[in-house]
Amino acid sequence: MTRLLVQARCLRSVATRGARSERGSVSLLVAGVVAALVVLSMGAADVARVLHAASTAQTAADAAALAAAQALAIEEEGPTPRDLASEYAARNGAALEACDCEPGTFVATVSVRMAVGDLFLVGGDRRVLARARAEVDVPLPDPPGMGHPPVGSGVYDSSTMAMRQRLPVRRGRRSLLATVDYSLAKRALINQVRTGLASWTDICDAHPELMRAAQHVGEPTRRDCPVCHEAKLKLVTYVYGDGLKHDNGRVWPLDVGLDMAADRPGSWCYVVEVCTECQWNHLHEAFVARAG
């Protein structure tokens, strides 16, 4: 009997040690899994922060390039193209790194930097760089015999617009229409939505008056809407200038708007692209008479 009791106690002791060993192994495994999940979460947070900074930096670079290009186009006294690029980069939370935008040229290339902030897994001062380029399209006279594409009878697209830009609006005039293209800003806005920094409802918000103008007097294009891809974009033209009085801000046919911008120094002709299905709208191009 005594021997049986001893054997039973030995078996209970062995079983207890085995259970404790198994509990210890499970605890180590759980701790390892938790640590791995924490590291993965921190890494995901770092990646999200870097992507957000990169997207914001690209938006700042696009805005800075457009501001510098607009200053190159109008050639007026005031802030230099570099100063404007630096200002618009700062407005978007970035710092201007470099700006190749000398007055008298027609291309603005800017680089900006933006601090990423403290990261969980990587220490030190981390920054992202972004670069953008905007070009002022200065038209040149066409060779003799080149016709003018009729705006009312033809479909407006990039080829007809390029032909219209190259023609002098008035024979013998020294001032020519210069163009500021806003494709960079549009691309940055759409990228913000695709990366989750904005929603489609934030950018598909055309004013009812703009929608009515697009539906009734907008000029059709062959380009699909970049948002819904279900409708062709329409172009609405506005002209703003100090001497226009009651005509300031009215909707005009594209050819009339270009003539008005060329005839009135300081006036701007803005072309807005609109989708009549999803209410997407964005500034497409701006035209201004260059100083002779």
Image: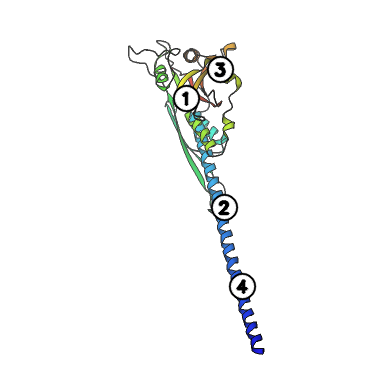
Tell me which amino acid carries mark 2: Ser
Residue at horizontal 45%, vertical 25%? Answer: 223
Residue at horizontal 36%, vertical 12%? Answer: 147
Q: Position of residue 201 (x, y in %)?
A: 59, 31
10 Å crowding of disc 1: few (<14), some (14-19), many (20+): many
Q: Are marks 2 and 1 in contact (CB under 8 Å)?
A: no
Image vertical order of residue 163 relative to residue 6, above or below = above
Point out which mark residue 41 bears.
2
**Residue assigned mark 3:** 213
The local secondary structure at tag 1 comes to strand
Tell me which amino acid carries mark 3: Ala
Q: Position of residue 239 (x, y in %)?
A: 53, 16
Q: Residue furthest left?
A: 144
Mark 2 or 4, which is nearer the eye?
Answer: 4
Point out which mark residue 276 bears.
none
CA–CA distance in space, label 2 to label 4: 33 Å
Mark 3 or 1, which is nearer the eye?
Answer: 3
State which tag comes first along the sequence, 3 or 4.
4
CA–CA distance in space, label 3 to label 1: 23 Å
Tell me which amino acid carries mark 1: Val
Q: Are marks 3 and 2 in contact (CB under 8 Å)?
A: no
Residue at horizontal 40%, vertical 18%? Answer: 160
Residue 99 seen? no
The local secondary structure at tag 3 comes to helix
Residue 25 seen? yes
Q: Are marks 2 and 4 in contact (CB under 8 Å)?
A: no
State which tag comes first along the sequence, 2 or 1.
2
**Residue assigned mark 4:** 19
The local secondary structure at tag 4 comes to helix
Point out which mark residue 180 bears.
1
